[in-house]
Image (cartoon, rainbow, N blue to C red):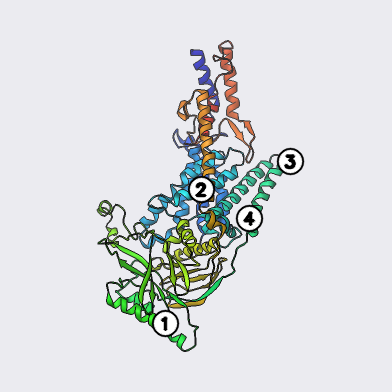
Amino acid sequence: MASGQESATAAQRAAAPAPGAPGDDGGGPAGGPGRLASWARGVLPRTLLALLAGLALAAAFPPYGLWPLSIGAVAALSALTYRRTARQGAWTGLVMGLAFFLGLLKWLNVIGWDAVIGLSLLQALFFVPLGAALAATSRLPLWPLWAACLWVAEEWARDRVPLGGFPWGRLAFANTATPFTPLAALGGAPLVTFAVALTGALLACAALRAWRLRRALATRAALPAAGATGLAALTVLAGFAVPVPTDADDTVRIAVVQGNVQQPGMDFLGRPMLILNNHVEATLQLAEDVRSGREEQPDLVIWPENASDLDPHRYPEAYQAIDRAARAVGVPILVGALVDHPTREGYVENQGIVWDPRTGPGDSYTKQHPVPFGEYVPYRDVLSRFITRLERVPRDFWPGDSTGVLDVGPARLGDVICFEVAYDGIVRDTVNDGARALVIQTNNATYGRTGQPEQQLAMSSLRAVEHGRAVVTAAPSGISAIVAPDGTVEQRTEEFTQDVLTGDLPLRDARTVADRVGAAPEWCLALGGLLAWGWVVARNRRADGADGTTGPAAVPPAPGGPDRADATTVAAPGSGDRQPSVPAAAGAAADRTAESRTGGARPPGGGTAPDPARAKQEAGDRPA
């Protein structure tokens, strides 16, 4: 028995790499200056690269709009997690995710940098399982496919939880005017995300294969790299084969009024009636232009979200102002207004109201998805004790329970309010319920000149292609815009100006494939990625059971900690080949030495003594 223990101990000593030796990637600085230097060489470069990849991904979104960086960022994360342990992948994902959301959501600093950091950290947590799963599935055949599916799964989860989810920052929203965009007409935003992620993962695969070629320049060895590159190119070009229907069944003349606000920021409302009077004034000027022949008579007028900061049903001055504007222009106005809930005291509804010039207020749509901490405060009784800033949301918004399909004059429009444009289901249900064009009533005055209005307008462009509908965005301070069914922004305003957009809006009845299949592509792709990850976890557990181990703790850790690189075998980048490393060879030599000391003793059942380094590597392959 003592001889067997001595053999195992000798093998461990021989298998453990010296600080800084090949295979010692480090997992922590414990163990002295040498270990600290080894850890820094292994972990810090990967951490810095993940941080840069996250910032690059943020730059792929508006207002910068460098969309190819979305492909590069996905490729970087795939390469950085390739054949890593689950903990390494999770850490890499967290760093990249945090850098990404800090760059993407910096417009929240209008509220406070604590809001930026808090929301960014929450969203970055979704990149932790993403990184771990990418590391685990990178050992599977067709791993770029599983990587793309896992990106869809990450967005699927982030779009739904917590508190209804926060879909900002989806790969699809960085690709709203790119070769990938037409794919939205087939499978919605999730299919666009899948194509972008697949392209990035394939390029990472090609790069890893090419890295291998620096040691063995051979035509046969170059074929996998060329094949991955070719598949990536085909994925990019696939969108050009997708038809984007734009033919109008009918048209309607519209006017979009941007009345402007007093000032940007949290106090944009100013004194009561100020914003409402701005929109009334701009509409009266439109009516004068029509009478003088400078402008063609519109069929309907669209005002933005919160155009009336007072409930017109309860404040006669607000009612009379809106009614005066509607009678002057002579056509219905879709008015954005805050309305007191009719039966629940203390609650308010965010509505779009059809205001007829003869009969006054008629049908309305109530926003279905109020923004947490912006339009209602979850757990108000508890959180208000610690966060005094929540007093700026004195009343909670009550959610609506139906889609915003409204007959506004001769047009059947689908009303979607503000952040709802980011949610697939809300927009899709509105189109499937009969909307012939979409209206996004929004109020971005709080975040003016921060890049947030550009990010939201990009979503409108994607929705236009996804549903084959023209999209009108109306904002009190901008950016207001008219978007064609092919996603082209035909007209747009500048921020913090009073302006009126007029034009012929195409109305369409046909539904796209994406409207018909609904969320099925998203569920299938997400499930495919999760099943691949689950298969790896189950396989590793079966292997542990066969070896009589229970996980990483069953084997004493080698120097360098749990974050060290594969110590038993060295995988050529981009390949499935595994070659014995120096530590593994040393471990085998130690086994032979110990065996000779014990007279050739072997473990019961034959075979050789267990290789702790290999057991450590196999345990490390398992996702944490």
Residue 522 horizontal/vertical position (percent): 52, 50
Q: Earlier in the sequence, mark 2 or mark 3?
A: 3
List the single residue furthest toward the bottom. Answer: 292
Which numbered circle lies on residue 220?
Answer: 3
Q: Viewer-proximal residue, 355 or 276?
A: 355
Does 36 sit above or below residue 403? above
Mark 4 → mark 1, Cα distance in angstroms:
47 Å
- The correct choice, above or below, for 360 with respect to 586 in the image is below
Please tell me how crowded label 4 is: few (under 14), some (14-19), or many (20+) other residues with Cα within 10 Å.
some
Residue 20 is marked as: none
Mark 1 belongs to which amino acid? Val
Q: Nearer the viewer, residue 454 or 251?
A: 251
Residue at the (65%, 56%) spot, across then down: 237
Given contact means CB atoms under 8 Å apart, are the residues at marks 4 and 2 in contact? Answer: no
Instruction: Return the disc, 4 or 2, that comes first in the chain's sequence.
Output: 4
Residue beneath label 1, please?
Answer: 329
Closer to the eye: label 4 or 1 = 1
CA distance separating discs 2 and 3 = 38 Å
User: Distance from label 2 to label 1 (Cα)?
Assistant: 47 Å
Tell me residue 236's x, y (percent). 63, 55
> What is the three-letter code of the residue carrying label 4?
Val
